[in-house]
Image: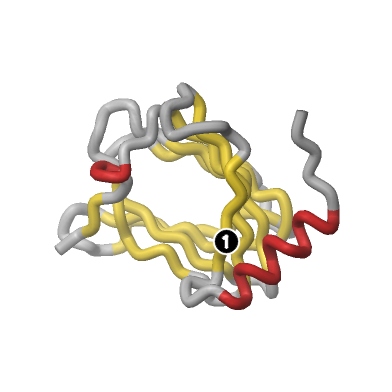
């Protein structure tokens, strides 16, 4: 059993503030080989995940926004914005499910945000993200 308490979350946010990417994660699964990958991602204001997609057919991902507010932007293959919306606190969206090949970026809008990411494993770092070039 693994319990995540306020001390653990405070530590995660502190690590995010120190990080160049302004985010930090805590793995809830045991191995990259696990069939279901689960992780908490703490973000602080202006943390930005560049436009990317996941090219393998099993690489869907689901975000559950537990705290704060994030902006999610969807793009076409030319890099043009198709859709932009807010998710999390004070919005009507708290769960976002992305299909493989959906190009997306994420930006933390609030002072801090916490997301639970769930995706199918195993995780292969060679196919983690594909960026638009």
Tell me: 44 left or right of 61: right
Q: Quadrant of the C terminus?
A: bottom left
Residue farthest along the right direction in this orientation: 6
Mark 1, other Cα within 10 Å: few <14 / some 14–19 / many ≥20: many
Q: Is residue 110 visible?
A: yes
58, above or below 106, in the image: above
Please name the residue shown 35% across and 33% down the image.
Answer: 59
Please name the residue shown 57% across and 68% down the image.
Answer: 108
119, above or below 74, in the image: above
How many numbered marks are there? Answer: 1
Q: For residue 98, which quarter of the picture?
A: top left
Q: Which residue was labeled with disc 1?
A: 24
| Coordinates of residue 76 in the picture (x, y in percent) | 23, 53
Please name the residue shown 67% across and 56% down the image.
Answer: 114
Please name the residue shown 46% across and 61% down the image.
Answer: 106
Q: Is residue 93 visible?
A: no
């Amino acid at each position: 059993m693994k319990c995540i308490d306020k001390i653990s979350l405070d530590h995660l946010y502190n690590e995010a503030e120190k990080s160049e990417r302004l985010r930090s994660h805590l793995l809830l699964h045991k191995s990259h080989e696990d069939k279901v990958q689960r992780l908490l991602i703490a973000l602080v204001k202006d943390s930005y995940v560049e436009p990317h997609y996941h090219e393998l057919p099993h690489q869907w991902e689901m975000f559950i926004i537990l705290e704060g507010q994030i902006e999610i932007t969807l793009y076409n293959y030319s890099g043009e914005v198709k859709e932009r919306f807010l998710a999390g606190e004070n919005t009507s969206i708290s769960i976002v499910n992305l299909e493989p090949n959906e190009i997306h970026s994420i930006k933390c809008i609030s002072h801090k945000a916490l997301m639970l990411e769930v995706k199918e494993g195993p995780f292969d770092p060679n196919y983690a993200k594909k960026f638009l070039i």
